[in-house]
Amino acid sequence: MKHAVYVDGQEGTTGLRIHDYLAGRGDIELLRIDPERRKDPAERARLLNAADVAFLCLPDAASREAAAMVTNPATCLIDASTAHRTAAGWVYGLPELAAGQRERLRSAKRIANPGCHATAFILLLRPLVDAGLLPAEAAVSATSITGYSGGGKSMIAQYEAGGDAKLTSPRPYALGLAHKHLPEMMAHTGLTTRPVFMPVVANFLKGLAVTVPLHLGQLRAGARAEDLHVAYERHYQGERFVRVMPLNDGPTLEGGFFDVQGCNDSNRVDLFVFAQGEQALLMARLDNLGKGASGAAVQCMNLHLGLDEGLGL
């Protein structure tokens, strides 16, 4: 039996990538809207309620509107927007978050897909808070460098048109210190102090790396860099999509530079700890269009439907 799947907002970057993941699968029937009726609320509602799983690849307000259209209790919504990532009644779509998260996703009918920066940040810090190594009230900072596809179709077009010298160098943004991923970054790590977070967009299509610098004095008394690494290994033991790299990873240090695009075209996240003396750098990289967006959404769909979690990924 095929599972009926509808992507509301299928013309956007995330929606197109979800279609790419699903188009060749024999177990999926993709429901498609007539382009001329793309903004017809009645037709959208019909397709949303006809789906076993519906992906919302829309701006926040439109996602809330679409969710309100669903009256079929059997339809599972997976929302790729920011709208529901800390909302009551919605399960956060990060299977590797903590024990029991997969079971919650299997039974959920409302799943909020994580943000790309947030995924990397949470995977770095949640194990440390859970292990008692990093106090929940700790003041931390993070920098994230990402490819321009994270800005959607308009930013992709801007970069690929060329001719603008400002786009040739990295561009820090969210300088108002109110990036939209911050609420989920706090809610799903357990941190009670808002992180200082600076994202940077650069002149490459995809790939993302979040870096969290730490003084070991911020950790539980007596904690060492080795303890951070052990916490990751324990938390992610057996996870197929999270790879804990060796402490002070030799090939990376020998090369002298960090490869932000090292997880591209995969649904994998690589975690690193680099340490020297009383300082450490925690780093996580992923494909912002894969595990950072569409791949994560398909992973959650597979889980919810009782399929192999990595099917098609």
Image: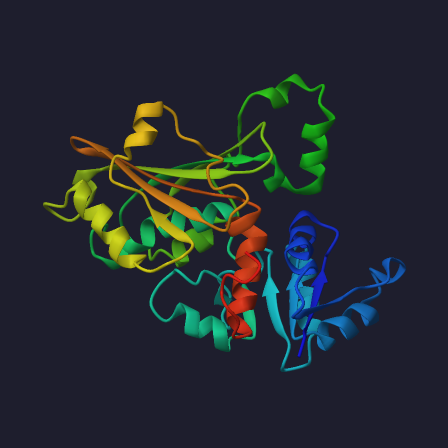
Task: Quadrant for residue 84, please give it.
Answer: bottom right
Q: Position of residue 27 (x, y in %)?
A: 65, 70
Is residue 230 placed above or below 155 in the rendered structure?
below
Q: Could you tell whether 123 is left or right of 181 in the image?
A: left
**Residue 55 x %, y %:** 65, 63
Q: Quadrant of residue 103?
A: bottom left
- Tell me what residue is drawn at x 71 percent, y 23 percent: 162
Q: Quadrant of the C terminus?
A: bottom right
Can you see residue 192? no
Residue drawn at (37%, 58%) of the image: 239
Residue 116 seen in render: yes
Of 145 and 289, the residue lying toward us: 289
Quick check: 31 above or below 121? below
Residue extending furthest right?
A: 36
Q: Residue furthest left?
A: 222
Which residue lies most toward the bottom here?
73
In screen coordinates, is 244 left or right of 218? right
> Which quarter of the figure is the N terminus placed in?
bottom right
Q: Is residue 221 above or below residue 54?
A: above
Q: Is residue 278 left or right of residue 103?
A: left
Residue 296 vs 51, above or below: the answer is: above
Residue 167's x, y, as percent? 62, 23
Q: Position of residue 295 (x, y in %)?
A: 55, 54
Q: Report the number of discs.
A: 0
Q: Residue at image x 18%, y 47%?
A: 227
Colouring style: rainbow
